[in-house]
Amino acid sequence: MDDRKLLVTAVKAADDKRAENIVALNMKGISLVSDYFIICHGNSDKQVQAIASEIKDKCSEIGVNVKRLEGFQEAKWILVDLGDVVVHVFHRDERTYYNLERLWGDAPIENIQSEISQ
């Protein structure tokens, strides 16, 4: 599976469930964990769970199974591990608190605007 196709699939799935402020960080050469981090948020527990579920479902459709899904019940920070792509789906307040974009500030932001509906 091409990691760019996986990235685009996960971004589109998040966008389909109205995830807000979707950011993709290129982690190649920075993290040994994955090639890309996607960070986004929802405004309620149900929306956060819906975003994570949609990502899981859409990636399964293209033959990529979730390696690990953590935090689903609490719905404050759900981690969806797809291997080369790790998705962080936050509740709005938790995203502000953890501020992963600042933590991984040396990672270049991947241009995904064409994948996100306007």
Image (cartoon, helix red, strand yellow):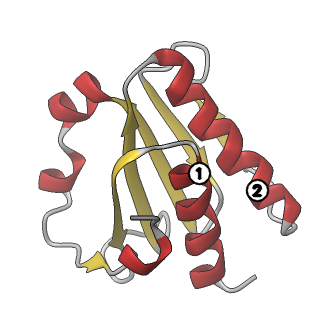
Residue denoted by label 2 = 58
Residue at image coords 44%, 44% = 19
Q: Position of residue 30 (x, y in %)?
A: 30, 75
Image quarter (top left, top right, bottom left or bottom right) of the C terminus = bottom left
Looking at the rendering, in which quadrant would you find the N terminus?
bottom right
Which mark sits nearer the N-terminus, 2 or 1? 1
Residue 114 visible in the shown view: yes
**Above or below: residue 23 compared with residue 4:** above
Residue for badge 1: 16
Mark 2 vs mark 1: in front: 1
* Residue 71 showing in the rendered view: no
Q: Vertical placement of 106 versus 71: above or below?
A: below
Contact, CB < 8 Å: mark 2 with mark 1? yes
The image position of residue 85, as x and y in percent, is 55, 65
Name above or below for residue 107 compared with residue 90.
Answer: below
CA neighbours of label 2 inside 10 A, class few (<14), some (14 to 19), many (20+)? some
